[in-house]
Amino acid sequence: MSTATAPVDSATGAATPPVGKGTNRPPGKSDLSMALVFIAPALFGFLVFYLYPTIRGIYFSLTRYNILGRPRFIGIDNYTRLFGDALFWNAMKVTLEYVALNILFQTILAVGIGVLMQRLTKNTAVRAVILLPFLISNVIAALVWFLMLDFQVGIVNEILANIGLDRITFFGGDATAIPTIAAVNVWRHMGYTALLIFAGLQTIPDYVYEAAAVDGSTEWRSFWRITLPLLRPILALVLVITVTGSFQIFDTVNVTTRGGPGNASRVIQYYIVQKGFTEGQFGYASAISFVLFVILAIVALVQLRLLRAGESDLA
């Protein structure tokens, strides 16, 4: 009479579970139920706070709705009106100007800070100081810079006057309003972006730079030929986050300029809120929001495609 014995681990001498039982068994109904329990909170949040409002907003974009009455279906009239709305196109132009300035300066400065942290110091205290502006709320940061850059009593203009230079209407000038708003947001988000890039730099192995140094490559040449190409996946992530966040700029504008002077800083998000909550045109505001959603989706897809996010030259 023979008896079945469990396999024994040669290193520890302990019995191991037989193959086909326990760890390698196919998933059953109990596993599916347990998985549904774990994903239920996230699924509920997605359905209630993302999918339902999106579908509801698309429906409102096809109606005339002022929140005091029932929505009246009008087809694509809101979209037809939108393409002939000069203020909408001005808001889109102003937003694109802001997005270009924000992305250009934020990305360049963040890459520079990330590389300097990688090469000079990895001190945790330095990273905390760099991240500090990001921990301040947008409203507080905008209010502080609004007071510092005030034409009459702001400390920056006081310094300019004391050294013999003309005062500058930072938030009050047609040509300076958007660059000033962009500078405030670059200051606030630059540290967070730099830390993302710093994390990407940690994934590049040292032997790559050592091999380049043996071949006589300079620091500058290694940066262009090694660092930037190997940072492509994290740069794709940074650009998608920055672009989508930049298109949604609102609080800084609302605190500092309220879209002025004239329409010089009336960005698209401010225009949507103005149409919806100030003028009560929720249907038209929903149509603008849906167009903005489509633009952001296309921009994100094009960025991910062009930068081949997820692919690394190290693979």
Image: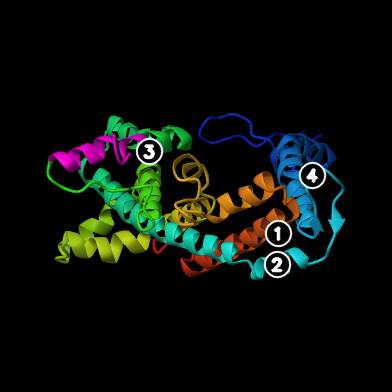
The residue shown at (76%, 58%) is: 61
The quadrant of the picture occupied by the N terminus is top right
In magenta, the rendered stretch is 147-162
Q: Earlier in the sequence, mark 4 or mark 3?
A: 4
Q: Amino acid at mark 3?
A: Phe
Q: Quadrant of residue 129?
A: top left
Q: Nearer the viewer, residue 210 or 126?
A: 126
> Of callouts 1 and 4, which one flags the residue occurring earlier in the amino acid sequence?
4
Q: Is residue 79 left or right of residue 213?
A: right
Q: Position of residue 302 (x, y in %)?
A: 54, 68
Q: Answer yes or no: do the residues labelled 1 and 4 have beta carbons within 8 Å?
A: no
Relative depth, front residue between 171 and 313? 171
Question: Which of disc 4 and disc 2 is earlier in sequence?
Answer: 4
Residue receiving disc 2:
81
Task: Tell me the residue that label 3 is attached to.
Answer: 146
Residue at the image position 59 percent from the left and 62 percent from the top:
88
**Secondary structure type for disc 4:** loop
